[in-house]
Image: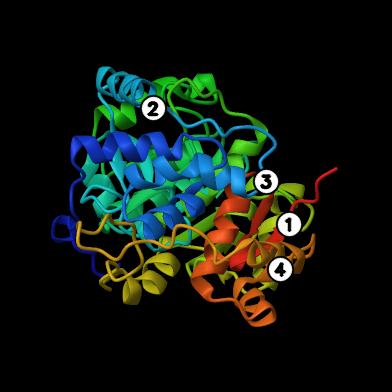
Amino acid sequence: MSSSVSSGKENRRGVALTDAQRTAWLRLIRSDNVGPATFRDLINHFGSADAALAAIPEMSRRGGAARAIRVATVQQAEQELEIAARFNARLVGIGEPDYPFALRQIDAAPPLLAMKGDFAAANRPSVGIVGSRNASISGAKIAAMIARDCGRAGYTITSGLARGIDTAAHRASLDTGTIAVLAGGLDQPYPPENIPLLGDITGGVGLCVSEMPFGWEPRARDFPRRNRVIAGISLGVVVVEAAQRSGSLITARLAGDFGRLVFAVPGSPLDPRCHGTNDLLKNGGIVTTSSQDVLEALAPISQLDLFNGSTIAEPGEDGASPLMHPLDDSDRMRITNALGPTPVEIDDIIRHTEIPAATVYLVLLELDLAGRLHRHPGGLVSLLMQN
């Protein structure tokens, strides 16, 4: 067996949010049309969540919003924080020590995560293990074997609390540390039969996390967001028994987009549960027949300092004043007219319009807050055409 990774205690770096900042961050991310990427751009532009909150109603109006944007209130944010405290959970910001360190590096990482359990699990390198809900006995067995061996080598095992492969991976790593990523709020785990397992995870050396608010019942479109967090937390993702067009393949694709390793356990061509994993192998996935395959491949990167990636922080009061308005309405019109339903790079917009980058970014923020901009993977944007 390859050498184990460090315990992660030295990775607890970051700056804690003040109570006022945490409330403002929560208000901002819970406001209409503010997702992780928009949140990051607003903080980078205005310097603080408070300043962004004050600006977004007017920005959305200038962007052509059909109605006034809903901004989460202080009372709503404080109520969610109180619910989290009663649930023995915390809302952790991306720049804080307990935020999963590898997740910080991905583009548009969740600015706040609701977290409950042993926070040390988030500060160790992680291996994601995902696969079929309708797992075979042999599939569940190899998932458990990989989870157990990687856990003993010092990795936290991350999965999605689903039936089948996820369940096997979580159970096998209860003693060494596992992270369950939920598609709904922390108080809305799915499936219901895994609620006792979730209790075992959070009651021991494991952790459950979610970017969704308390009370949020998971819907089909929420599971790809959950898969994104699994891929972001993990240095590598192991896929065991995945059918074609399965959620596990979404996790694998995202892991590849994030520069993480993708492992696939080969299976019988006659078993539909293995069609997706076998396709991964045809497209560069690492053949995985033992835990050693995973540990040897991850060994070189598990020792790297992963704190040099981008993050979100609020600068001091002496930061530069933001550009509050485009130069004039003609600039806004030129930028909007340059956009269409086809995704384009922001640099291309800047070159095409010959408008300063700061103005282009601000106009895109206005359109985003107005619900008229679609952000695509890779930093591409397109205009949502209005009827």
Which residue is the site of mark 3? Answer: 64
Which residue is the site of mark 4? Answer: 334
Alpha carbons under labels 3 and 4: distance apart:
14 Å
Residue 331, given in percent of the width and then of the height, sits at 64, 67
Alpha carbons under labels 2 and 4: distance apart:
52 Å
**Mark 1 or mark 4: which comes first in sequence?**
4
Residue 253, given in percent of the width and then of the height, sits at 61, 61
Disc 1 or disc 2, which is closer to the eye? 1
At mark 4, the secondary structure is helix
Which residue is the site of mark 1? Answer: 383
At mark 1, the secondary structure is strand
**Mark 3 or mark 1: which comes first in sequence?**
3
On residue 198, the disc is 2
C-beta proximity under 8 Å, tags 3 and 1: no
Disc 1 or disc 4, which is closer to the eye? 4
* Amino acid on which disc 3 is placed: Gly
Disc 1 crowd rating (10 Å Cα; few below 14, some 14-19, many 20+) is: many
